[in-house]
Amino acid sequence: MDSSSIYAVSLFLLLLLPLHSAFPHNSSASAQINSNSILVALLDSRYTELAELVEKALLLQTLEQAVGHHNITIFAPRNQALERHLDPEFKRFLLEPRNLKSLQTLLMSHILPTRIASHHWPAADLHHQTLSDHRLHLTTKPSGHKTVDSAEILRADDVLRPDGVIHGIERLIVPRSVQEDFNRRRNLAAISAVLPEGAPEVDPRTHRLKKPAPVPAGAPPVLPIYDALAPGPSIAPAPAPGPGGARHHFNGERQVKDFIHTLLHYGGYNEMADILVNLTSLATEMGRLVSEGYVLTVLAPNDEAMAKLTTDQLSEPGAPEQIMYFHIIPEYQTEESMYNAVRRFGKVRYDTLRLPHKVLAQESDGSVKFGHGDSSAYLFDPDIYTDGRISVQGIDGVLFPPEEEEERTRRTTPLVKVAAKPRRGKLLEAACSMFGAFGQVCQ
């Protein structure tokens, strides 16, 4: 090959290079989703409950990649099946942040990595593998009704798109693995193990083993919660909490992390979570208390209420801890239990972790009102987190004890000078009485 031929080939390759860069062959370009995709149709369809769960499970990117490689078939439960016909405990379990994997497995079990329209429906029992490796049984009953597992197809070919199809089904399909995850949490298998016992003690008088009174599993602690609290900053630094309580009944650290994650995902309570985790050590202290078997109810002010706190209220040593202690009730209360109590008794005073102060609750405008005066707050977001040990109730104000509220009022009230009324004639009257004693008369 001469030099002119080599030059021609090189020039041809240089001309092809821009064309090659203009048409990339990577997988990301082939996985682009257009407006006519089945995923866009799902988000705009009648199956709003399923679409909301898909967004909460963070599955949109995973489904985009699946649609970029092959067509899909989605079995969408109707909204009534997810709103009314689903166990509330099971739905609460699915929406907890730590159970995100179970929610993803549940939703991916409703999606097949292939396109199966109604005219392709098998007459006999046929197995198909879902995106979560769960096997679905597709069959046609003698009556002609199409079924997938135990769910009947209500709307066959409800949504048709070039990259997939959506069939409406009557109920939710729950895989066995998700059922087992839920049953393990519901049965509290983590706390049903044999409780560890301390070393036996010998009575020096009788040289026999002491037999302490047995404490049944799950019983409340013997000591009051105030004895288990860490000493405040004015006494000594709070000790570092251990991995669990003396009897290791509960994993309090995990439960506290769960409710703080729930606050962050709920939105509007970032300031409260920041104080518990970063500004104070209350999160670790609450975890230790729950590990010991205590229960807590947290009245969480929202971000709008926390923004009204002044620098003077937070700058004093131990002030954030004292404010938060007044918002923690050493009882397990839900919105329903507190509302029933105030409806029955009118006014209820709940103990707080800030001794000896109590928080006042009363019924107002169909809700629960805490505190009194200017520092009152309403139950704004009920039951943000409830797991049987920790209950978090959102309120729209920051509460203060009555004594502090009166002191704050005195500080903010301007001093008013009161002028003494003139007492004219009193001095002359006294002088006349003195002269009268000497026999002189005042004219």
Image (cartoon, rainbow, N blue to C red):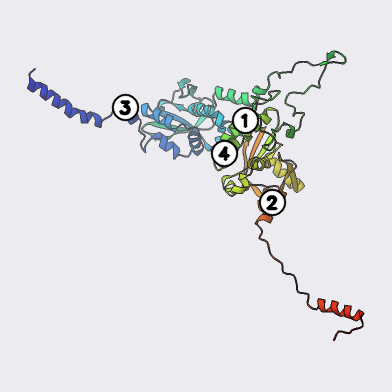
Q: Taking 106 as reference, is 25 left or right? A: left
Q: Where is residue 327 in the image (x, y as percent from the top left)?
A: 67, 42
Q: Residue 255 bears which disc, if any?
A: 1
Q: How far apart are marks 3 and 2 (CA)?
A: 65 Å
- In front: label 4 or label 3: 4
- Give the Cα separation between the discs numbered 4 and 2: 25 Å
Q: Residues within 10 Å of mark 1 (few under 14, many from 20)?
A: some
- Expressed as whole percent of the image width and height from the top left, the position of residue 345 reads 77, 46
In depth, the one of 270 and 68 nearer the eye is 270
Residue under label 3: 26
At horizontal 55% and vertical 29% (from top left) the residue drawn is 99
Residue 290 is left or right of residue 46, and the answer is right
Labels 1 and 4: the sequence-earlier one: 1
- Lower sequence index among marks 3 and 2: 3
Disc 4 designates what residue?
274
Residue placed farthest to the top in the image?
207
> Looking at the rendering, in which quadrant would you find the N terminus?
top left
Instruction: Tell me the SS state at disc 4.
Output: helix
